[in-house]
Image (spheres, coloured by chain):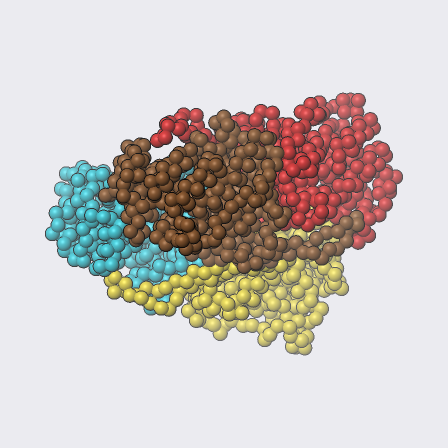
Chain colours: A yellow, B cyan, C red, D brown
Amino acid sequence: MVKTGVIGCGYWGPNLIRNFRSTKNCEMVICCDKDEKKLERMKSLFPGIKTTTNYQDLLDAKLDAVAIATPVGTHYPLAKACLMADKHVLVEKPITRSSEECQDLINTAESRQRVLMVGHTFEYTAAVNKIKAIIDSGEIGEIMYVSSTRVNLGLFQPDINVIWDLAPHDVSIITYVLGKNPISVNAQGKAHYTKGIEDVAMMTLYYENGMIAFLHNSWLDPQKIRNMVFVGTKKMLVYDDISANEKIKIYDKGVEKPRYYDTFGDFHYAYRYGDIYIPKIDEHEALGEECRHFLHCIVENQIPRSNGYVGLNVIKVLEAANQSLTMQGTSVAIDSNSYQTMTGKGHEASEHRK
Amino acid sequence: MVKTGVIGCGYWGPNLIRNFRSTKNCEMVICCDKDEKKLERMKSLFPGIKTTTNYQDLLDAKLDAVAIATPVGTHYPLAKACLMADKHVLVEKPITRSSEECQDLINTAESRQRVLMVGHTFEYTAAVNKIKAIIDSGEIGEIMYVSSTRVNLGLFQPDINVIWDLAPHDVSIITYVLGKNPISVNAQGKAHYTKGIEDVAMMTLYYENGMIAFLHNSWLDPQKIRNMVFVGTKKMLVYDDISANEKIKIYDKGVEKPRYYDTFGDFHYAYRYGDIYIPKIDEHEALGEECRHFLHCIVENQIPRSNGYVGLNVIKVLEAANQSLTMQGTSVAIDSNSYQTMTGKGHEASEHRK
Amino acid sequence: MVKTGVIGCGYWGPNLIRNFRSTKNCEMVICCDKDEKKLERMKSLFPGIKTTTNYQDLLDAKLDAVAIATPVGTHYPLAKACLMADKHVLVEKPITRSSEECQDLINTAESRQRVLMVGHTFEYTAAVNKIKAIIDSGEIGEIMYVSSTRVNLGLFQPDINVIWDLAPHDVSIITYVLGKNPISVNAQGKAHYTKGIEDVAMMTLYYENGMIAFLHNSWLDPQKIRNMVFVGTKKMLVYDDISANEKIKIYDKGVEKPRYYDTFGDFHYAYRYGDIYIPKIDEHEALGEECRHFLHCIVENQIPRSNGYVGLNVIKVLEAANQSLTMQGTSVAIDSNSYQTMTGKGHEASEHRK
Amino acid sequence: MVKTGVIGCGYWGPNLIRNFRSTKNCEMVICCDKDEKKLERMKSLFPGIKTTTNYQDLLDAKLDAVAIATPVGTHYPLAKACLMADKHVLVEKPITRSSEECQDLINTAESRQRVLMVGHTFEYTAAVNKIKAIIDSGEIGEIMYVSSTRVNLGLFQPDINVIWDLAPHDVSIITYVLGKNPISVNAQGKAHYTKGIEDVAMMTLYYENGMIAFLHNSWLDPQKIRNMVFVGTKKMLVYDDISANEKIKIYDKGVEKPRYYDTFGDFHYAYRYGDIYIPKIDEHEALGEECRHFLHCIVENQIPRSNGYVGLNVIKVLEAANQSLTMQGTSVAIDSNSYQTMTGKGHEASEHRK
């Protein structure tokens, strides 16, 4: 029985609490927020839960694990304190404000043999895992180009820009699905409402094999759009996370080699237009899957799918994006050797905890 | 009766011929293409039309005007020859391969007192003119941000990249609707199929008052999308050119000033979500409108809406985009003084022809 | 504080329990189901709730009110027993299997001065109330024609046909919105899977002023559709309950009087095509509204919006439909005098309880 | 070279003329309309075409074939006159006002060895033929239930009701795709604008094997809908003729035999939800296909797919519908022996012309 606490009871925290409470091998003990009103709400939603306004109560408590769902600026000190108190830690995305902070959390977790996991929820959705399976099967061919649109009206974040708020989803999905990290980043954007906090942005990611990805993030769009297009050498896949029953569409479309010659002496490609296929997805709540994975890794001494290095690699991209933003969109390279990974999933405890 | 010829009988030429033939004050005399088969097709589609494989026959003919719908690389020499032969000229977009070429056409047209017009067809659509009227009315407020997506599978152009092929529409619509030209351009893209010819691209345009525009163009997308979002300080407008009956949607949505304070001491904006309004658009064929406008300007000695300078200003943006592409997406400034305009629409003949 | 119990913990019961628990002036005491497993689930979902497999425990308990969410065949005996034990009663739709049963419940409730309410949930949705307000305002004109489609795959009911399962929603919405009851009913249908239980059906309702309504219900459709069209003499309104943000669309369309004469001497109407307007709906959970209304009527001695007579009038239509089904779709008249209503909403206790 | 004339130059006639003109083995000679203005328009659209206001000019002319696109009431006398003048005849749907008239045309065509064809255009569309191929393959299983919605605002017909205007499409598609004719018909409807001319209607068709079909036709709907659902024992197929790229969707959904027992002792079916598949359709203009088929049958002495008997069988259903309308929707049986068919497609001339 893993005894768990949650820090942060705003938008996301209650979802974590609800999921931990409904998981068998977990005892959801205590939640923390600075705001007494939010704690009152937690008590009414979750009868029997303990509450506190002081996160140190979670360090003293006989807890095994803590999940942190607070504003990004507080992720590092809270996670550090929890790890130092020998708690396993789940942190919401983005994991920290900088790669230095993240590396320090990784080091701390390793030295104290604790699980450190980042809440890249989409890596636990049925749709994203279906996309990964389809692309891994080779059906789509080699991915040449990804285009992602993640826009809506609000919710403006006070301390991070729209890229740090929304792009962690896009970057973590691409990395998880394709197993690739970008080698350079361009980012453009504009802060219309809060000085220094871009509310609309566009990123371009370049990858080693010529793959390119466009990521469009905005807090200023009238329609909520969650759309990703994966264009492969064989087929094309569209992922619309808003659609209830048609989340993934596979288009049997492509550009063919055979050329013919035209009026003015120029050549043209041939195009292939074929069937569309919409696979059935067995829906489940991704956050439940994520919470169970966190608990499983604690109990079984395993390395989580979205471990500290996975969080770190996303932070490197976000840092490069911020740098590009300050340089009017100039390309910022990321040394591909700087990306690190755990040496495998499902490690034994001895490896994990050294 | 304006006697008219058309050069180029591929995809767009037949549409020009059909429209000229159905316009009252126009006599559609002769069409030209290097490809005899295309000329045969024109004869069967348009009984009675004269054809030639030599464009010089259109210079000798007793024609008043010539429309040019050939590959971009041939626009300049053909238009120049026509103007030198004292023909009024309508050229498809983009008007030329360079601003130098375009400036030379403008100079030639002015010295010979001929109409020079570029086929920015969207400036003649009912939808774009409705959007212009709505924004001019102030209903949307000041436009902060434009996002445009113009993607589909194919048709790859052999001599120009996807920006030069598709973005002239986006740029000319924004310029026409908002009356603004960008002061800097970033462009990213990738050539997957033909070396040096980008088939996917993303542009960011910055404007003087802080407005930003993202333009996404691709020949490698499974779905045909023609979508523009105009986000204003008061409302938001979505233009979906694919939709049959809901091309323009006005969202009474916005970000409100009043702030409140949150758990962690940070402020939040308030959001306004209201009704959606879909204005009726009186559809017509935009190309017919464009052709009639060309003929009207010839007969009435007026300056066309999409005159040479309008074409030139688009070319300046495309040139900056190409330059940025070669510099890994670095920002390329455009001197706002470099944009030129005719000194008004609907000039009298004396002004036009000096 | 109204002490409440719920009978039936299958699909709908837990929603009732959850809503009663979150309402201030309500104490959700006990729930009942024949199935121990369902009761176990209730205990885990709602810590502290009492459970029983014997509904008589709810009659003995010091309860003020009981909500019944069991299969239709058990509505009458359970509601009767509750009323006889002086409980206020909320019954799911359809209220009973016959108008005789329903009339007996009404009589019992009146004689014992109890609230009797039927769970016509749509009468409490924001969308339906918005439609009612729009139509009441006269904006749409007189309604000539209603077309409703309520189809999906499953869930087959074992004891009632698709009309009794789904059409109570359509009939209660039309009656609530327009304040009219049909004077005749035709029903066609077919039982493909269970003998005698139609799984697809079509009803036609005729109203006194020439209004006609088509109701299409099916358990055998691949797409879930919840669509109603109200065609008025001035405008047309479409209600799509599946749409997230565009539930109600008002079309400024109509048929105009002016006629002109045609080739063959026949006349034609003129058509008006105008703007489309999508009003903002302030969403809330309809079932919460319904539960609060039930509690309010108990405390304030008022007659519920969806009172026994409202339930009865729906049953009369369903009975006529069943009769028509057995007569190959022949028209079955309903005496308009047979419809009864409470003499007003928001009655004082003295009127309600005589 | 088949010399062809067209009577009726309103909405549909010009499409016939255009298609005949672009078909190789056809000479489109002359068109007829009572309205001189329409003839002027034909001359400008189709340079060189002869025109007349007197249909007798088409009987005298050296024509082989005549296509008739006039109001329904004139179909019989015009077609009869053409057949008596030894012309092959293509008549728009519905073929005549009554089965007697239709039978007389069939007899006349047979005795004079002429082709008689009705313009059931949907039988020549790529989508309907794809549906037929899919259902014929057995993939969908046995069809249990068809639901069709064919509604829009206008165009009101002056002489026939909405069933006679729109349902010929639904009935001919079902008959063509499934090879079945209904054994009884119920029809409800209402005439809101022109006395005796129903503008909204609902039909129910029963077939011998228990199949049922609902047909909803309306001239009073704000949205144009062309939707048919075919529910089979194995899968379900949705045909949306309005959709540009997703006209046919095959849902791998169904009701499964295995039962389990529930709380209250009742059984439930299990449901299967699977992938969705959207086959590519190779679009072509159906009317062109239809015109070429007409010419082919003339030249090759073959019986058309949509021959006189196919037209007659539709008329029988429409007559039954009208009868049911006058009897308040009472079921009207159609003797299944009354349906007739040509004894095969692609007959040799000897059989066709006796």
Task: Confirm whether residue B243 shows in the render.
Answer: no
Tell me the residue at 33%/67% (across/down): A259
A34 relative to B68 in the view: left or right: right
The front one of A287 and D31 is: D31
Q: Nearer the viewer, residue C316 or D351?
A: D351
Q: Residue at x 62, y 49 (%)?
A: D209
- Asked whether residue A259 is in view, the answer is yes
Q: Is residue B151 left or right of residue A71?
A: left
Residue A263: % across, % down: 25, 61
Q: Identify which residue is drawn at 67% across, 28% down.
A: C334
Q: Position of residue D134 (x, y in %)?
A: 52, 57
Q: Return the x and y of residue D213 as percentages of the image width and height.
A: 58, 44
- Across and down, in percent, residue B149 comes to 41, 53
Q: Please, is residue B261 above or below residue D137 in the view? A: above
Quarter assignment of residue D88: top left
State the quadrant of the C terminus of chain C.
top right
User: Hey, which quadrant is residue B132 in on the image?
Assistant: top left
